[in-house]
Image (cartoon, grey):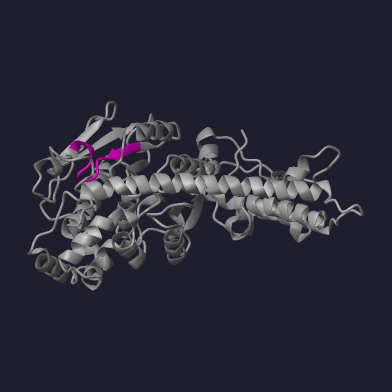
Amino acid sequence: MGVFPEGGIRDGARSLLEGAPLRPGASTLAHIAGAPILPCVIVGSDRLYSKKSWLPLRRTPIWIAFGDAISTFPDLERFAARERIECELTLAFKSLYSEVREKFRLRPEDLPHSPQERIDEAVAAVCDRRKSSTINGDGHTPPLQKDNRESRMRFGNRQVLRRFAASGVDLLMCASINLLQSRHKLHARSRDEMARYVSACERLTATNFYAVPNGAEIPKPFGTDDEPSRIITWRSPISTNFPANNVVRTDFFPCPRGWSAPTVLMLHALMSASHIGYRRCAARLNELGWNACFVHLPYHYSRVPRGYWNGELAITADLIRNAEGLRQGVIEVRQLMGALRKRGCQEFGILGTSYGGWIGALLAMVERDFRFVALMAPIVNVEHAIWESPAARFMRRELRRASIEPSLVARHYHLSSPMHNQPLCDADRVLFVAGEFDLISRPADVEKIQQQWRGSELLRVPQGHFGYRMLRETIAWLKERAL
């Protein structure tokens, strides 16, 4: 069996050859199987990302070195044996890498580079050749230069069409959101109520605000080891004026590994159209050895009060209800994590989209036990979401009519805005996914928080705020990194 312990091509500080930590998968497999590990270092395979490396009669050098077999140390205890294997394997990799570099006198361009760098090198080389081409004596442009110009025009046209289509969908959905928000108007006391609410919240930290209240009902251990429950319900610790919203529901999708397997918490978007896509995603996660939980966020799915649309009450001009809905969602997920820990689950992942990404970012501010936190088009800039977003036009009109000014709302950002906070979990486990044509969660805002949460990563996807491509590419990204 061949195992790539880095989970993909890594370069620079991300590579274990340059000091990055070794993933535990290889040592765990070897110890369980009782089979020795034969260390192997491959240098140059990243060159194959360049199309020119596959041309006929072209030879792309790749260097491979094998070391001595490493024992599984059966005489040691399990954890001590795995640590010893990882230590020996790390040293072997570094020794082989150094040997290959010295023996074959490798240059910097021969060493590992990211796939994007290799692709960019190939594109730059082609552009350089085309720039050096001159116009023929008869005044005609060489064919190579024509092809370059035509390919750029085709690419530009595709980008324009994609942006136009994505923006059209975003604006159409924003119009429907504004139409629903028009059903919810503020009253004469709204400004005073908001002032009292933010005054009470100013003294709180995120830890206090999102703490599970004392005496709150904790989800009891559900199901048996052989037959875990598929539907988990309990009473929400946050009581609202809508009884249907006061009962929490989570759909649980177990994998064959049982309760001890890590669990992905799937947090859906605002006014999510259907749960079918998330169920398909749960099936894929089960195949990868993860349990999955589809959480019904406040005012969505089973928690929609009679007479309202799915998610209609989650975001309106009533900013107090909005903030309490976020608080309710974060606390309920923390309760679920506590119940799963009692069943033996020690690691969690988050797949959050839009509104769910907002709640996922707030969770990352108060929880540590995350193997990954994938936030797709999350609402991270609350100021823009309220005062500039096309999805909040009616909300802004109501706030101004009620004399609720931006400075008053800003006094709550230390609790509700991810951009004004830092994660409690390791930032290098956080992935931000931005839609290149997103009008609601602007790419610039997602890039800004990714830079603020130092160590986090950014994935750009050519879509608007609404679409399914983002989820597919995020799952593929996580799978590539063996998360």
Q: Residue at x 31, y 34 (%)?
A: 274
203 shown above or below 443: below
Q: Quadrant of residue 368?
A: bottom left
Camera-side residue: 469 or 28?
A: 469
Residue 320: x and y, percent? 16, 59
Quadrant location of the N terminus? top right
Image location (x, y in percent) of residue 263:
35, 41
Q: Is residue 63 magenta?
A: no
**Residue sticking out furthest to the front:** 138
Q: Is residue 350 visible?
A: no
Please give left or right for residue 34 compared with residue 402 in the image.
right
Who is closer to the viewer here, 296 or 363? 296
User: As drawn, is 167 to the left or to the right of 102?
Assistant: left
Highlighted range, magenta: 292-302
Residue 347 picture location, percent across and down = 37, 46
x and y percentages locating residue 20 in the rendered image: 57, 57
